[in-house]
Structure formats: structure tokens, C-alpha cells
Amino acid sequence: MTGYTAAILEKDGIIFEQFCLNCARAFGACVMLRDEPMDAPIPDEFTPSDYHKRALAEAQAKLTALNNMTLSERVEYGQEKQKAAVQQRQELIESAKKAARKLILMKAKVLAWEPPSSDHVGLKNFMLEQIDSTLQFDGRADGYTDEIKNLEMRPFEQFFRDSVEEAQNSIAYHIEQDREELERTHSRTAWIQDLRNSLKQKEISK
């Protein structure tokens, strides 16, 4: 018995139409309903998400604000972006140092541990491998130090230009994603309407 066949086995059972609609929840058109209760109705028409419309409006507003900045405002904006970027890397450096200290302390304990048998040596080696791997990716701060140097050498105007390009890319992205969302919603609505029309034409649904 599955979540879809359970209703068939109930005392009163269910008609074919309801069984078909329940199973339709597993398909793309209704996949967003799969976690809802089985008796939750399937809508006749799906409504597109407005996420990309809202994100598009935000990106357009940001681009307009950037383009309306005076030269001095653009320089000040670049300075603030540079400061924030450097601060973020400094926080990452501190986080990496803390992680390294904890990992090195744990590695010392693992190295000091004597496995109770030869069968446990593999476990010790695995523990060391896990620590060394984590140290390699989460315990190194030198990369962030280099990034800070590069950030401090970049002209303030470049931070401004990067933000303009980011806003432009965001606008293009959300325009395309909103178009695709509308197409998906139309396709889902057509799919469920075709299914309902098919069921209405079948005597077996009664």
C-alpha cells in the first residue's frame, strides 16, 4: 500500500477520477502539491510566482539609483563597497584561524590515541584524513589575505562599475526567469485542464 493506493483500500474506497487526480500530484504540473494533504484540492488554474517580478523591480530600482549618482557619490559608494568586502574577508580569516585551532587540537588527540587493535588502525587513519581535508579547505586564511590585498589595490570606480554590471545581469536574468515561470504556469494549467476534461468524458470516472 502506498500513499496513493491507501484510499482505494478504505471502507468506501474512491472513484477512478479521484484516484487519477491523486496520482497526478506526482507529476510536474502538480509537483508543488506533493507535500500537501491528499484531500487538498488541485486548482483548475495555477498562479505564477511573482518572485522574479519583484526581484526584477528591485534590480531596476538599484540600477536607476546607481546611474543617478554624482561622481563624488560613486566614489563614496565604491569606498563603502571596498570597506565591506575587506571586512568580510577579515571575518573569514578569523573564522579560518578559529577552525584551524580546533582542528589541530583534535588532530593532536587523534595522533596520541593508540588504536586497541590492528582492525582499528584504519579508523584512526580515516579520522586524520578527515581533519587534514577540513584543514585544507576550512582552516586556511592565506587565500583571504591575498584577496584583501587585491581589493585594497582596486580603484573605487571599479566597485561602482561592478555593481552596475551586477544589476544589469540581474535584470536580464529575472526577465528571462519570469518569462519561463509564465510558460511553466501556462503549461501546468493546460495539463491539469486536459486531464479534467478527459476524466469528464469517461464513464469509468463515475
Image: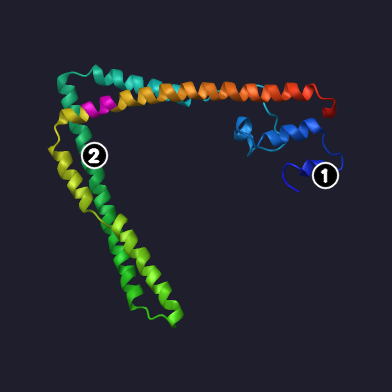
Q: How crowded is mark 1: few (under 14 residues within 10 Å), some or many (20 or more)?
A: few
Residue at the image position 41 percent from the left and 80 percent from the top: 115
Residue designated by label 1: 9
Which amino acid type is marked by label 1?
A: Leu
Left or right: 36 in relation to 112: right
Q: Is residue 200 visible?
A: yes
In this image, 28 relative to 141: left or right? right
- The amino acid type of the residue labelled 2 equals Ala
Mark 2 vs mark 1: in front: 1
Residue 135, percent from left and from top: 30, 60
Callout 2 crowding tier (Cα within 10 Å): few <14, some 14–19, many ≥20: some
Q: Quadrant of residue 42?
A: top right
- Percent coordinates x, y for residue 34 in the rendering: 64, 38
Residue at 28% over, 61% down: 100
Classify the position of the C terminus by image quarter: top right
Q: What element carries label 1?
A: helix
Residue 64: image x %, image y %?
29, 17
Residue 47 visible at all: no
Marker disc for residue 85 = 2
> Dominant secondary structure of the magenta stretch?
helix
| Residue at figure coordinates x 15%, y 20% from the top left | 71
Q: From this view, report whether residue 106 is shown above or below residue 38.
A: below
Left or right: where does residue 88 sit relative to residue 57?
Answer: left
Cβ atoms under marks 2 and 1 closer than 8 Å: no
Magenta stretch contains residue 127: no
What's drawn in magenta, residue-wise? 161-165
